[in-house]
Image (tube, helix red, strand yellow):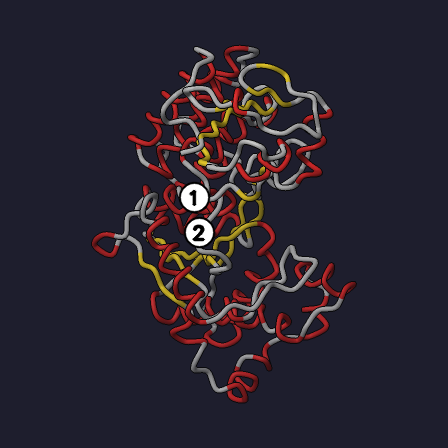
Amino acid sequence: MQDNVYDVLLERGLIAQTTHEQEIRELLGKEKVTFYIGFDPTADSLHVGHFLQMVVMRHMQNYGHRPIALVGGGTGHIGDPSGRTDMRQMMTKEIIDHNCECFKQQLSRVIDFSDDKAIMVNNADWLLDLNYVEFLRDIGSCFSVNKMLTAECFKQRLEKGLSFLEFNYMLMQSYDFLMLNRKYNCKIELGGDDQWSNILGGIDLCRRKDQKQVYGMTFTLLTNSEGKKMGKTQSGAVWLDPKKTTPYDFYQYWVNVQDADVIKCLKLLTFVPMDEIRKMEKWEGKELNEAKRILAYEVTKLVHGEEEAEKAKKTAEEVFAKGGVSADMPTSVIPDVVGMGVLDMLVKTGLLPSKGEARRLVQQNGLSINDVKYNDVNGVVTEDMITDEGMIIKKGKKTFHRVVTK
């Protein structure tokens, strides 16, 4: 085991930018540091993009540092403009509070919150009762509008129109860092690389208000070899909530990553030792498929637990290796499926997001029903398609789904 978590994060390719590289490495090597990562409650589940941040928190915690998971019960009322081309939908306080509660359950699978080893804090505690005029005088006076307008998080929004509501977001996130430093002696803010401008704002505010030196570090965004964000499928985001993305579908997502991405994902998203990953870097062909199965198992185990990972692995082996049907494979119950258009049925199962996508799949010879290629875009489901085991749909080479009537 290495002496310094900074070296671990660096070796695994997790670090994108740091504000003070040498000072941060020294700090992490000589004392137990309290650090924070913010999660805005924009949905009732975290997704794969957040998972990378959870893994960083776990690495830090493994070396004795204390994570603060900051949920944005306050900032969630505004919405972060970073990486957005449009304004986020406004949410009610009840929805925001519910989403925050869901986050804690999911974070607890990866982060140890027992005995104060990590804490969860809600910025609603200090943001919602602020006096606006006092806040402007105290905090707003520390920010240069000219400098803010050059920030990457605002640039693309300026073309379409940035609301004054969102313009406040940087002040609020910076204020979070100031409050966490005062309350918990929090010294480092971590975040995705799209948070760089907001992190710099917080560091500058702590220096101006309290003459305190604090630090920032961003980590790599989870992108594939083409530079596109990972964690999206045709039917939407890959969620950590098993009700939104089943453990089997979650497992399958990682089994199906591109060859060029599997080693990178093993480094970023698992705790598989680097010596083992370096051996896998030399693998090709069938061996690389084994690396994908290791990736899928390890990530599923972290998010859903060992039992669900074992079940997903077993189901995948039954469905793919034996070409059979498993009781645990993804299944849709559609009582009135007979007589339904095949394209409508594909959308109803969630395999495709729209009839247009379903039509393209059929036209491109990508659909099999009960192991027979299906090419009729105007076809309907007939009774003889529903066998004793149900109707087995195969999308592409690797995605299986069963439809039953009850």
Task: Between residue 157 and residue 320, name the one nearer to us.
Answer: 320
User: Does residue 171 appear left or right of residue 225 in this picture?
Assistant: left
Q: Which of the image's four quarters has the C terminus? A: top left
User: Does residue 255 appear left or right of residue 104 in this picture?
Assistant: right
Q: Position of residue 104 (x, y in %)?
A: 35, 55
On residue 45, the disc is: 2
**Mark 1 surroundings: few (<14), some (14-19) or many (≥20) residues within 10 A:** many
Marks 1 and 2, how far apart at CA: 6 Å
Q: Position of residue 210 (x, y in %)?
A: 46, 75
| Residue 31 can be seen in this image | no
Q: Which residue is mark 1?
A: 240
Whether label 1 touches label 2, CB < 8 Å: yes
Q: Amino acid at mark 2?
A: Ser
Q: Position of residue 277 (x, y in %)?
A: 46, 22
Q: Which of the image's four quarters has the N terminus? A: top left
User: Does residue 376 appear left or right of residue 323 in this picture?
Assistant: right
Task: Between residue 159 and residue 308, name the one nearer to us.
Answer: 308
The answer to which image quadrant residue 158 occupies is bottom right
Residue at 51% in and 31% down: 253
Element type where label 1 sits in the image: loop
Badge count: 2
